[in-house]
Amino acid sequence: MKLSRKLKRILPRVQKPARYVGGEWGSVVKDRDSVDLRFGMCFPDTYEVGMSHLGSRILYGLLNAQDGVWCERVFAPWIDMEDEMRAAGIPLYGLESGDSIAELDILGFTLQYELSFTNILNMLDLGGIPVYASERKGLKNLVVCGGPCAYNPEPLAPFVDAFQIGDGEEVMIEFTDLYRQAKREGWSKDEFLRRACHIEGVYVPSLYDVSYNDDGTVKAVTPKDGAPAFVQKRIVRDLDSMYYPEYFVVPSTDIVFDRAMVELFRGCPRGCRFCQAGHTYRPLRKKSAETLLRQAEAVLEHSGYEEISLSSLSTSDYSELPELADKLLDFCEARRVSLSLPSLRADSFSLELMERVQKVRKSGLTFAAEAGSQRLRDVINKNLTADDLLNACTYAFKGGWNNVKLYFMMGLPTETNEDFDEMAQLCRDIAYCWKCNTPNKARGVRITASASCFVPKPQTPFQWDAQVTKEELDEKTAYLRVVMKTKNVTFRWHDSDTSYLEAVFARGDRRTADALYTAWKSGCKMDGWDQCFDYGKWLDAFRACGLDPAFYANRQRPLDEVFPWDHIGCGTSKEHLKREWERSRRAEPTPSCLEQCAGCGAASLMKGCACHV
């Protein structure tokens, strides 16, 4: 029975059936017989999350622009759809062709979040593909992963054939060209992987052995069969000449970020010590305003979107932002398209710019304060003061805004209850600021303060730091719930159980793969969703494998410890990260890269090109 007939039987019984039918405007369908490489762009979460991911959209367009290559989209089905698919004998399929993913040559997964790891195993299994790399003998169904979590690839090492470290636009075509050569010339999988490991930015875990000390820490990661001892990430040096699609696939159902996007620059000059992206996306590389305007106009003309977002880690640090926004707004306003500017910082808030951007509808403003006290903000190198926040709020409230969201973290290194007291005071000060500056007190003010749990991430200055225990986090949450009881302030907090598991796999070694597999076999999947996460099953899985998750999450690491990811380079040197960790203990901030070079080492990847925004 054809897939379409089977789907007609089951789709009326599932939520959001539009997730599973494909056929959207802008999707690419090619003749199977005219291509020699079929690639599955796999996102290990639901359609509406995966379709919002800009990186996947770029690579989808890049691969389909190649003659002889057909890239399809593959998403994790929700629980109800998976049950129906298994009952009906429907394997996981590509949206463009409806063919089982077992018919695809390469399956490329993006790793955005540690709690999506079980979905990778589940998607492979749903496609009838062995989850262990050693059990996939031929070239077909090669599993490749990239994205932020690839900077510590070890928890997924037994399941993945190769990791692409760094900018996918730079390494993907070289990798797929080599694969096409391997197919033509009849190479074995082992021969292909031995050659692929010499592509800059490609890590093949099967070509490395890991040894351990008696205390359970990593002793060494040793390459074999000629593999390089150190794998440095790959970067795009010139973003103006980089491929960027002129259109996106337009979803036929609501997604998380349903809008066009253009990327201002890569990297971040701020150097927040907890932030993995701020260190792994270095060095700073920007697109010119002319390139951005051309790309934005093309995407809007070809997609029909009614909103476009300027994307980056720190949008207000783009040096040509006012000029770009003015030109883009002239184009957008004539077509009734709205412009959004995410990732604005309170210390560079422009009321004039925001008034023009949001003159049709004043949406809420969001500021990431991260910590309540100046001391703790200096520890994490936030380079933001309470006056910066209050000044930004003053401008906003005078301009008619009355909805402000504040993001904080709890469990940060050196944190005390006094820092929480100052967090509460900051929220009270912002509420009073509104009272003093609003032109319309009758509308009221909404201040939402959200606190998430600190997760130490690899390739950051805080990679040595312990995550506080679940009991300590619960105590901190209880304290905050008391001190944050302020009129007009709503306090929300993040669950500590998922943050604990995130910390385990963020700094896990290759042995944690056993617990990952065991948890998945016991039914764990969609772990990033509250209604699916089962903390008890995860603890059982670690016990069954003889592993202590606290060893990975709650242990302070000495500065001389060998990390499971030390053989993976993000451009920022470990020596620089150590210096930043030491400065954090002195609550000593480091200036922005725009003010003074901190010598992190990432600029060396530019090889003569400029590093600036």
Image: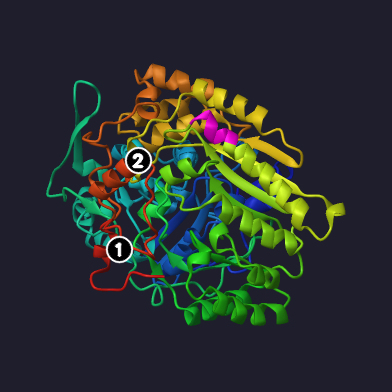
**Circle 2 sits on which residue?**
586
Q: Amino acid at mark 2?
A: Arg
Is residue 418 or residue 235 the one in the foreground?
A: 418
Query: Picture coordinates of residue 22 (x, y %)?
Result: 61, 58
Seen in the picture, residue 80 relative to 41 is either above or below; the reply is above
Residue drawn 62% across the image and 58% down it: 391
What is the chief secondary structure element of the magenta stretch?
helix
Any part of residue 343 in sight: no
In the rendered structure, which disc, 2 or 1, sits on the residue that comes first in sequence? Answer: 1
Is residue 259 or residue 513 the one in the foreground?
A: 259
Looking at the image, the residue that sits furthest to the right is: 442
| Magenta stretch encompasses residue 348 | no
Query: Picture coordinates of residue 337 (x, y %)?
Result: 69, 73
Provide the secondary structure element on which disc 1 rests.
helix
Give left or right: position of 214 versus 297.
Answer: left
Whole-number angstrom distance, CA of label 2 to CA of label 1: 53 Å
**Circle 1 sits on which residue?**
180
Magenta residues span 416-421
